[in-house]
Amino acid sequence: EVQVVESGGGLVKPGGSLTLSCEVSEFSVSDAWVSWVRQAPGKGLEWVGRIGRKSEGGTTDYAAPVEGRFTISRDDSKNTVYLQMNSLKSEDTALYFCATNAMPPYLFDYWGQGTLVTVSS
Amino acid sequence: QSALTQEASVSGTVGQKVTLSCSGNSSNIGFYTVGWYQQISHGAPKNVMFGESPPSGISDRISDRFSGSKSGTTASLTISGLQPEDEATYYCSTWDNILYVVIFGGGTKLTVL
């Protein structure tokens, strides 16, 4: 069965940077759309962004609150998707989930357990 | 405030049928398939329904007690024969072609009495 494993979370100061990783097993991430979804403490799910299939240009889309600060990328050799987060704010504190997208690529297929990011001084 | 509107909480007794709703507009639910996701105690969400069908390839993990429907700009998830293990928060989600993002509802906390 497909496994999705996130890593890289931790405590970071406001204005700092952090990069999360999402390793997927059983299929190639270059053939998939992959999204990041976050959940602030006690709150609901919020889509962060996604990266498209390599065959479709690997385009990226982002939610407005993170546009310009977060970047999603992919390393096909490691079958891993990354979320680089810069200029972090306290409101970015959340559990960050990685999820593979089904088709159409706004539905979510397999989810990881999440990695916690805390932005605090 | 979420782009999609869900009931904050719904409760039912074991064996009962409950229906959760998800309301949007013509730029999202009215045009796109709605996904439903079950989350237990802030663990990993699990997809339980895409539109009116369980997700393909993993349908053996989804109980046939779950069913989905849509009418206009409102989608619904119905759970028949409610079981204690169904107690969870359920989120609906879809694409919005004006905001150009994936949007979620605020989630419905289902309590099994």
Image (spheres, rainbow, N blue to C red):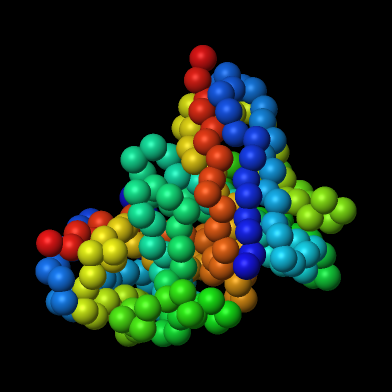
Front residue of B34 and A2? A2
Residue B109, position in %: x, y? 25, 57
Residue B74, position in %: x, y? 32, 76
> Which residue is painted at 60% across and 72% down in the image?
A102
Front residue of A15 and B52? B52
A98 lies left or right of B73? right
B10 lies left or right of A120? left
B69 lies left or right of A24? left
B80 lies left or right of B36? left
Whether A97 is drawn above or below A18: the answer is below
Whether B51 is drawn above or below A68: the answer is below
> Which residue is painted at 46% across and 74% down in the image?
B61
Q: Quadrant of residue B56?
A: bottom right
> Which residue is painted at 69% across and 43% down in the image?
A21
Tell me if residue B74 can be seen.
no
Figure quadrant of the N terminus of chain A: bottom right
Residue A72, position in %: x, y? 71, 48
